[in-house]
Image (spheres, rainbow, N blue to C red):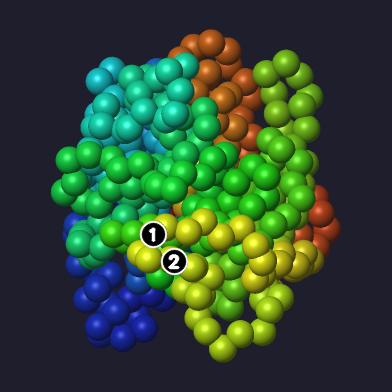
Amino acid sequence: MCGDYLSFSAVSTAWRSISQGINSRSPYKLPRYHFLPKKNSIPMLLQPGGEEGGDMHYLYSTTEQKIYSGLDIPELNNKWIPGSANGWLVTIDISDLQMNLLNPLTRVLISLPASSTFQKPYSPLFHDGSNLSFVKRVHISSNPVDDNKNCLCVAMVSCKRTLSLCKIGDYNWKKLEPSIFGINDVIMYKDLLYAINWEGKLFAIEVGPITKVAVIAKLEISRGRPQYLIKSSRNLLLVVRIRESIGPYHIKTIGFKVYKLVETQSTDTDSHEHFKTEDGAIHYQDEPLHCAWEEIETLDGMTLFIGHNQCSFLDPSLYPGNKKNCIYFADANYEHDTSRLQGIFNCPRDIGSYDMESRKIELLPGLSESSSRMPSIWLSPNF
């Protein structure tokens, strides 16, 4: 680790001063390559420690294949984490269901609207945010400190997995209208919000005073397979996680399929032309489809990190020790994770790496099984 710091700080006087400044602010001794510019920060696996989560947590480095233990983060005690991006965690307090954004390494906390402000989803059978399992995942569009005015939080809520939105400083969550259901993942891409649902429909959404929604692609996907949307340098990617049940409370990842979004209709217009409006009214467009998913066999030498977090797509050449064309995956079975958290049953964790070339899955070297009931999640350190 010392060698990493020396090589990093020796690049130039400017980089040396940056690395020394970060080192003085960091409360934990982490590898210095985690202090590269924010967009290049490689994720570490955050795992709560102790039977009940506790105050002491640890980070696992895929680059060094070792654990950094003894992280005292009381703000994570008794918290469910439905999302992570740009070094920030979305937390929900198990006792009062208060929602916050937390940078666990600087301990900065930003309040989000209370879960009680979610609007009821379409049926008296579904609760209104009064228990933990209401919020499935939360996407953070940008760094809430660097982009405070534009940072959009998108929550997938209720058994119907509808979308609710808020910005930093809002007092309430706002339900997306027109409604779309069964959402597995969302992402901001080229100024639009994209969402994929369990039927394999890809929605392009223009959020504004008049929200516009269009279905632009479809893919036949077996229901129940987790899906992840990722931005690459050239395309929007879709990763489908393939799992099998090997016991009453154990679902295990056995592989992945990766697709890139390609245009099927030549057009001189931009993506906003997917939307049609008449007299200022919202128009939901389902046909014709403008794009299609094309399966790919390689990540072009890149590395993916997926789980409850917002997926990261990075160049492993910057971090010796990480595999190219590899998908690092963490826990992502929401129902099992919340059941473990609530003490209903304790299913084994589903963490490892998948090599796109050999199609083999391996355990992460040096990572021990956590006794905590909290799920693991990838975190990109951000100081």
Return the x and y of residue 328 as percentages of the image width and height: 62, 51
SS state under label 1? loop
Quarter holding the C terminus is bottom left
* Residue sitting farthest toward the top: 344
**Residue 254: mark:** none
SS state under label 2? loop
Return the x and y of residue 267 as percentages of the image width and height: 61, 85
Q: Is residue 13 above or below residue 142?
A: below
Contact check, label 1 and label 2, Cβ < 8 Å: yes
Residue type at numbered disc 1: Ala
Q: Nearer the viewer, residue 98 or 77?
A: 98
- Disc 1 to disc 2, how far (Cα)? 6 Å
Return the x and y of residue 243 as percentages of the image width and height: 74, 37
Q: Which residue is mark 2?
A: 277
* Residue sitting farthest toward the bottom: 268
Return the x and y of residue 125 as percentages of the image width and height: 47, 16
Q: Residue at x 71, y 76 (%)?
A: 264
Q: Residue at x 36, y 83 (%)?
A: 11
Quarter holding the N terminus is bottom left
Q: Is residue 123 above or below residue 192?
A: above
Q: Tell me the crowding category of disc 1: few under 14, some 14 to 19, or many 20 or more residues within 10 angstroms, Cα based.
A: few
Q: Residue at x 75, y 67 (%)?
A: 294
Q: Is residue 21 visible?
A: yes
Q: Residue at x 35, y 23 (%)?
A: 128
Q: Is residue 114 above or below residue 146?
A: above
Q: Which residue is mark 1?
A: 281
Q: Nearer the viewer, residue 45 or 367?
A: 45
